[in-house]
Image (cartoon, rainbow, N blue to C red):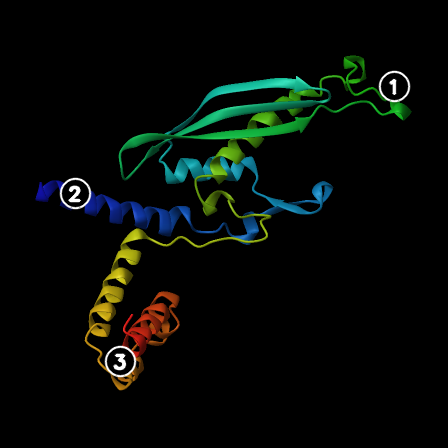
Amino acid sequence: MKNELKLIDENLKDAENFIGKVLSVKPENGNIKTNAAAKNSKYLPISFVENQLDEIFFGAWEIKDFQYQVVANEIIGSLQLRFFHPVFKTWIERTGCAAVQIQMKSQQNGGDGDITNVRNKITNTLEKDFPHLKAECIKNAARSIGKVFGRDLNRDSEDEYSPLTDQIEALGWVNDIAAKLSTCKTYEDLQLLYTVLDDDQKENSLILKMFTKRKNYLKYGK
């Protein structure tokens, strides 16, 4: 049993390193493009995304269950992006979905303005529109894997990856401080303990609540 727990622990740390040092790395600015036709939104080209999938998963990835349907002048689609996790040695799937426009003739170029009329479709436009849909679905699925695939592009706010082992280590010093707090019998003891904390610990909301609770216990007995 101990060997099994050790293996789980080692795999966990390897997985955290893989996420933190590979999947959570933001793409370089040189690889990020801007779409002027979509309010200058940022995106990663499909060639870059597919190349990243090749490099990170050693070519062990594939597309499954590509489905689509036409709604007015748009094609909407979904697919499963499947990749082999190099740490846990298992296949993982992520769903991707997207929609792209079917290019239609304008009224100035012979169209009648009806986006549901297939006769208004530009000849052979689906030769590029349909592959475009698949590419957008792949990129959408890949973004869910990590920042390296553009997860946080165009988001107003973003979070940073925090490994579970780091949180466990932090919990260790929280418990240590809690134990020391239980030995404080006076306000002077509390002040002395607070002065020896690190700056990060002094600003930690949980630590502050623990000190307040101990102070109230010393004052009111609860």
Q: Position of residue 197 (x, y in %)?
A: 30, 77
* Picture residue at 40% right of the left edge, 52% below the top: 161
Disc 2 element? helix
* Picture residue at 74% right of the left edge, 24% below the top: 103
Towards the viewer: 70 or 85 = 70
Q: Compared with residue 153, is residue 202 higher up or lower down, i.e. above or below?
A: below
Q: CA distance from mark 3 to mark 2?
A: 38 Å
Task: Check the picture and name the quadrant holding the C terminus.
Answer: bottom left
Towards the viewer: 5 or 57 = 5
Q: Residues within 10 Å of mark 2 (few under 14, many from 20)?
A: few
Q: Position of residue 135 (x, y in %)?
A: 56, 30
Residue 20 as seen in the image, left or right of residue 111:
left
Q: Position of residue 198 (x, y in %)?
A: 32, 76
Label 2 belongs to which residue?
7
Q: CA distance from mark 1 to mark 2?
A: 66 Å
Q: Quadrant of residue 85?
A: top left
Q: Quadrant of residue 81?
A: top left
Label 3 belongs to which residue?
193
Q: CA distance from mark 1 to mark 3?
A: 79 Å
Q: Nearer the viewer, mark 3 or mark 2?
A: 3
Disc 1 element? loop
Label 1 belongs to which residue?
112
Q: Are marks 1 and 2 in contact (CB under 8 Å)?
A: no
In primary-sequence order, the first of circles 1 and 3 is: 1
Q: Residues within 10 Å of mark 1 (few under 14, many from 20)?
A: some
Q: Nearer the viewer, mark 1 or mark 3?
A: 3
Residue 205 as seen in the image, left or right of residue 79:
left
Q: Are marks 1 and 3 in contact (CB under 8 Å)?
A: no
In primary-sequence order, the first of circles 1 and 2 is: 2
Q: Compared with residue 210, is residue 50 higher up or lower down, i.e. above or below?
A: above
Towards the viewer: 48 or 40 = 40
Give amino acid for label 1: Asp
